[in-house]
Image (tube, rainbow, N blue to C red):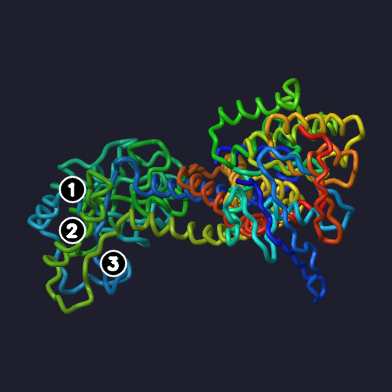
Amino acid sequence: MPILQLKNICKDYIQGKEPVRVLKNVNLTMERGDYVAIMGPSGSGKTTLLNIIGCLDVPTSGEYLLDGKSLRDLDDDALAEIRNRHLGFVFQSFYLLPKLTALDNVALPLLYADVPLKQRRERAAEALKAVGLEERMLFLPNQLSGGQCQRVAIARAIVTKPDLLLADEPTGALDTRAGSQIMDIFRRLSQEGMTILMITHEQAIADCAHKLYHILDGELHGEEADTHGI
Amino acid sequence: MRENIRLAFQGIWGHKMRSVLTMLGIIIGIAAIITIVSTIQGTNEQIKENLIGAGNNVVTVQLNQNGNVYDMSWSPVPSGVRVISPQTREELCQIRGVENVSLYCWRQSSSSVFYRNTQHNGEVYGIDPNYLDVYGYQVQQGRGFTQEDFDGFRKVALVDGNAVRTLFAGENPVGKTLEISSDAFTVVGVIAQSEEFAPTINSMRDYHLYMGSSAGAVYIPDAVWPTAYQFDEPQCVALKVGSTDDMTAVGQDAARILTDSQIIDKSGSFDYRSQDMLEQAQQLQQMSQSTNTQLIWIASISLLVGGIGVMNIMLVSVTERTAEIGLKKAIGAKKKRILLQFLTESAVLTSLGGIIGVLLGIVMAQLISRMMQIPVAISVPAIVIAVVFSTLIGVVFGMLPAVQAAKLNPIQALRRD
């Protein structure tokens, strides 16, 4: 069963008095273990699509099945729970809490999943190890470089062992070297079986994925370019 | 929850200056209330201690007309009121809790007592042999009254310390002669309240005495009272009660017995009423309390203003931390959790303010007591209420910002920067 199915997803925003259709009949299917990149220029609707896939926004019409279950008519708290249990987010600007150590930042999603403190610490340490930051667990974000911050953010996204990892321009705020380190981590995660959906506007980044889609003016065009294969 | 409290402390510690300024309103309000309550409590306890005395509990029962004490300095012997008989006195002794009973006559202000050319402006008492024991007087100089003084209708007198001062200008009065209603009385002794710790006040009279507003008192045996003043004067009654708690009940019982047995003309306006010191203490306490209640209301306004300040800062904090809230929601924090986080933060902030306020209030109360010689009693219930109340302020005024935070749309929250 596909982990993700989007069927004719449309999204309208009211701008002034006229509704503007940002997403037009988007269809997308992802299987477990897929590594998908969606490319598009800014304003193409890629962030809106990611927000809908990430359960941060709801589509105007169409059907969204996550792991075979429809997400229609769920309330905010139910969506929050799905985000917590099934999805992991990596943002362009990290969004680490500045007053918390790397370890506490990573442990935060587990707090919302009501995992006891000791286990939270253990699992967060494990996740930080997976991104190569076991030496810097008790550092505050402002003591870490941009690349390290993004690795902490990735650790936070994978600490809950999500079904789907969503990344929004994960290298957008980083220099090339740090960016390629991040991409290495994504590649390794993919090899370990993680399902990844990434949006970007850089061809080099998109080329790392197994499948590439283009989004333009709200329309998704499949260009099933199995660039690397497994 | 523990996590929330930890985070709240972190947040407060992270913005020390802002937190202190936010708490200031609460601190000042709570400190003011604690100071006021402590001084009220202290004053009240002193009044109670002074008026009720330490184990020297006396209830006086006096003849009243239309609710006012019937004063024979100005009025004639009331018709239809009997002199208290030994049987009635025995009845009074039988009231549960009564240890001793004294009957006495008195004039509030007597123009008929002179020492040489000095007129006595104080009171004159005709006392029975129990009087000194009931009121806890002790002989300081000379001697007290003996049974022979009573039996032999001797014209002898006792004076108290104030009378020594006003009437005898500080000389030793023992052996001196007083003129009472044109009769010569020999002063045989000076009496004073038995315990020296000041002030032990058993009656309003003692209170005035202590305050220096009395010119003192002269005591003569009740046996010679009729020759100096009047025959057939209905006496006043002083009852010494074992326990402070019984005073009110004993006073009421005694008043009822006396009203029943002494007043022949039931249709008249006379009755006996007890002067319960406990009651008078309460009246005095109420006086100080009502003025201070107003002060507490004023202090509460400071708390209200403090609460609004907290709300203001929390709203700023929510705006500032939009990204944080958005991120938390994105990684799965439910509305309730965000709400609780901000409520906890404002409640911790105001509770901390409350605790600091309590400490400051205690310090201020102590300072005031040092400077103005007012006793201070720190009230534990007041402290508990103050802290709980400041927590409540945090919850109430933190509600609006917290609801706003919980309602934030994560997309918009994350888009901000």
Q: What residue type is labelled 1?
A: Val
Decide which of tag 3 and tag 1 comes sooner along the chain: 3
Q: Are marks 1 and 2 on the same chain?
A: yes
Q: How crowded is mark 2: few (under 14 residues within 10 Å), some or many (20 or more)?
A: many
Residue B72 got which mark?
3
Horizontal relation, residue B390 to residue B55: left or right: right
Q: Where is residue A211 in the image (x, y as percent from the top left)?
A: 79, 43
Residue B254 got which mark?
2
Q: Quick one: B228 or B389, which is closer to the camera?
A: B389
Q: Which chain carries label 3?
A: B
Residue B7 got which mark?
none
Decide which of tag 1 and tag 2 comes sooner along the chain: 1
Q: Position of residue A156 (x, y in %)?
A: 69, 36
Residue B304 makes an appearance in the image? no
Q: How crowded is mark 3: few (under 14 residues within 10 Å), some or many (20 or more)?
A: some
**Residues tagged 3 and 2 counted as in contact (Cβ below 8 A):** no
